[in-house]
Image (spheres, rainbow, N blue to C red):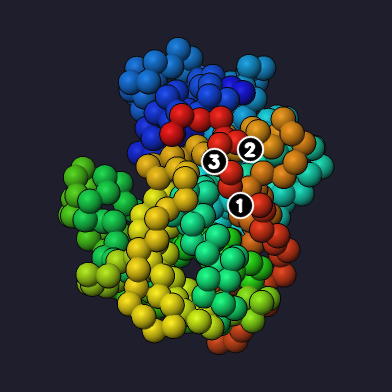
Amino acid sequence: MKIGFVGCGNISGIYLSNITKTFRNLEVAGVCDLVREKAENQAKAYGVTKIYKDMYELFADPEVDIVLNITRPNDHYGVSKAALLAGKHVYSEKPLATDLDKAKELVALAKEKGLYLGGAPDTFMGAGIQTARRLIDEGAIGKIVGANVFFLGRGPEGWHPDPEFFYKYGGGPMLDMGPYYVTTLVNLLGQADSVMAYGRISFPQRVIGSEPHKGEVIDVEVDTFSTGAIRFKSGAVASLTVSFDTYTDRHEFIEIYGETGSIHVPDPNTFGGDVTIMREGKPYEKVELDPGFTVNSRALGLSEMVDAMEEGRLHRANYMQQLHVLEIMLSFQKSSRSNAPVAIESPYERQPAVVPTEIKADF
């Protein structure tokens, strides 16, 4: 199927590379960006022949089967809605939207029109997290008791060329990096039940340290330190902390605790990584990864969605998962503001484990 790119920012390169080189069931129809120079640069770099003047011209192209929405987070809703209204299937970068009601509207619209809707992250489909899932499902550490999850850092203003949106509505560490961690948790532990959390804006202003905006000041609108707990339907409880405010040498960390042992899960922003297991207090041992995707394979979820469309089934990186993950993330701030637990209402069902040989890809 042919993919139309809306957005040619930093992450578009890996999508273009993987669609043109790795996934055999995908083809680039064309690209567009509000800054035409970005579209022109990516088209030249990856041999794309068609550049649209805007997204509406892209939507009107009958050759475009699926719109790949890789705009900024706060623009995801508007672009995805317009694409769905134009009758196009949509695959979006994370999150599905920055507002829960708007995300629900997108899901309802896709269902009404019989269109596929899904999106990132798809890193949970990589060999690292899939190996951890198999171990958990096989009972390698017994019934799951809980988990500890951290994403810690100093924020992107020191290196990102245009970091302001990270600190505005729709940004922050929870909506920026949280999708990787929360998506991993629901894939390992299942449906969430409730959230209790606290958060804060530690520094009301941030100074950009990278060009071309070096020295400019950002007024912060969103929590930059959030910590709390997710209770799952299974009874397991996971603590989750995300921060743009911390100095530490342990930046990414997921540990799952079971009745008879524990599992270290690799960085969920990657497809591979090390999986280690501790059984009954013995030292951690490295586990050989199951066959699968270990390098940066963004567009894996998109490729698998195309397979699902052809087979008439639900895809793994689907709107139900995106909606559930978004509700969990937004509930952290909601719980913090209300000083009370927040019930998670959206449904969620884990899809079958990934069978790499069924993906139409060279890996």
| Image location (x, y in percent) of residue 279 | 43, 77
Position of residue 140 relative to residue 2, above or below, is below
How far apart are the alpha carbons under marks 2 and 1?
A: 14 Å
Res. 289 in view: yes
Left or right relative to 264: residue 188: right
Circle number at residue 356: 3
| Image location (x, y in percent) of residue 80 | 62, 40
Residue sticking out furthest to the right: 112
Mark 2 = which residue?
305
Q: Between tags 2 and 1, which lies in front? A: 1
The residue located at (67%, 17%) in the rendering is: 62
Query: Which mark sits nearer the N-terminus, 2 or 3?
Result: 2
How many residues crowd mark 2 within 10 Å: few (<14), some (14–19), many (20+)? many
Position of residue 41 relative to residue 253, above or below, is above
Where residue 264 sits, quadrant-wise, is bottom left
Foreground pick, 52 / 359: 359
Element under disc 3: helix
Q: Do the residues bearing badges 2 and 1 touch, measured as CB atoms within 8 Å?
A: no
How many residues crowd mark 1 within 10 Å: few (<14), some (14–19), many (20+)? some
Position of residue 39 relative to residue 359, above or below, is above
Query: Residue flagged by tag 3: what amino acid is it?
Result: Pro
Please state the total of marks drawn on the protein image: 3
Image quarter (top left, top right, bottom left or bottom right) of the C terminus: top left
Mark 1 = which residue?
353
Where residue 321 sits, quadrant-wise, is bottom right
The residue located at (57%, 25%) in the rendering is: 25
